[in-house]
Image (cartoon, rainbow, N blue to C red):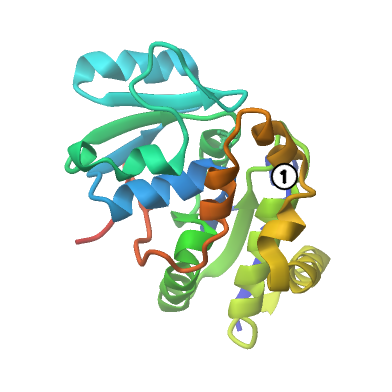
């Protein structure tokens, strides 16, 4: 049986080889939730970049430029990082370059994997189905916060481990720990995540609705995949 593992912080990636694996990058609050929402609403592609200046440079190549620092939209950018922004009908068919504090960095650290896909509660079952089809060993890469572990990404990892139990075997104790965390959280996900450091950080920006939306399970069926540096969904 293939295995599933969980890297709870990108700073621990040196312990988790990505070679031969399907990597699921997750940043529930809010980068990967926004990406999944964007594709569900018809965005053509997202070019994830780690650095602000590299993102800004994509404007002259016809991309909309998007992203946040400390949760706030970058002043001269077209879009921030709220999933609600990515529902706008005028974004259909558009190419977006996106940089975020942790989510796009986690993607950059996952390069070299057999495939990199984007996970969120919003597309949990679609991600699980995709992984069953791919049948590679799985590594869930939690974006965390500036190298530190966070609740929401680890709870998502646990939800995925739970969904795939019996089909993929835990590679070490991290997937088991994540699953136990999810078991504690699942009856009241929003209440559980209200305790998290990032919800407190976002609260002061008044984005509680974002958090609630990002906790919605299986709102969408899209599975963004990284191909040639760009995220897209298969038609
Ligand atoms: O760190 C990230 O990638 C962001 O998702 C953070 S925030 O939710 O926009 O603050």
Q: Quadrant of residue 174?
A: bottom right
Q: Is residue 116 left or right of residue 7?
A: left
Tag 1, which secondary structure? loop
Residue at point 63% right, 61% down?
156
- Quadrant the C terminus occupies: bottom left
- Quadrant the N terminus occupies: bottom right
**One can see residue 142 in this view:** yes
In the foreground, 21 or 77: 77
Residue at point 24% right, 34% down?
95
Dot 1 beta carbon under 8 Å from ligand 1: no
Residue 148, placed above or below residue 4? above
Residue at point 78% right, 38% down?
148
Q: Is residue 75 left or right of residue 174?
A: left
Give coordinates of residue 59: x percent, y percent: 27, 17
**One can see residue 7 in this view:** no
Q: Which residue is mark 1?
A: 9
The crowd level at tag 1 (other Cα within 10 Å; few <14, some 14-19, many 20+) is many
Q: Is residue 66 left or right of residue 101?
A: left
In the foreground, 196 or 117: 196
In the foreground, 40 or 223: 40
Give coordinates of residue 213: x percent, y percent: 51, 53
Q: Where ligand 1 lies, by quadrant?
A: top right
Q: Quadrant of residue 105?
A: top right
Give coordinates of residue 91: x percent, y percent: 23, 38
């Amino acid at each position: 049986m293939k295995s599933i593992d969980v890297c709870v912080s990108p700073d621990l990636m040196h312990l988790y080889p990505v070679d031969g694996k399907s990597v699921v990058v997750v940043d529930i609050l809010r980068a990967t939730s926004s990406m999944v929402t964007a594709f569900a609403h018809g965005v053509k592609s997202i070019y994830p970049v780690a650095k602000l200046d590299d993102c800004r440079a994509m404007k002259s190549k016809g991309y909309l430029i998007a992203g946040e620092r400390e949760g706030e939209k970058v002043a001269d950018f077209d879009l921030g990082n709220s999933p609600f922004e990515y529902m706008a009908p005028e974004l259909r068919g558009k190419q977006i370059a996106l940089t975020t504090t942790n989510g796009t960095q986690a993607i950059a650290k996952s390069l070299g994997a057999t495939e990199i896909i984007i996970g969120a509660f919003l597309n949990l079952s679609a991600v699980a189905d995709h992984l069953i089809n791919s049948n590679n060993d799985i590594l869930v890469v939690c974006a965390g916060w500036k190298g530190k572990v966070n609740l929401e990404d680890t709870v998502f990892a646990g939800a995925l481990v739970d969904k795939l139990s019996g089909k993929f075997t835990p590679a070490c104790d991290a997937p088991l720990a994540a699953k136990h965390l999810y078991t504690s959280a699942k009856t009241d996900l929003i209440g559980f995540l209200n305790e998290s450091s990032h919800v407190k950080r976002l609260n002061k920006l008044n984005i509680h609705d974002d958090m609630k939306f990002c906790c919605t399970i299986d709102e969408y069926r899209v599975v963004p995949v990284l191909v040639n540096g760009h995220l897209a969904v298969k038609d």
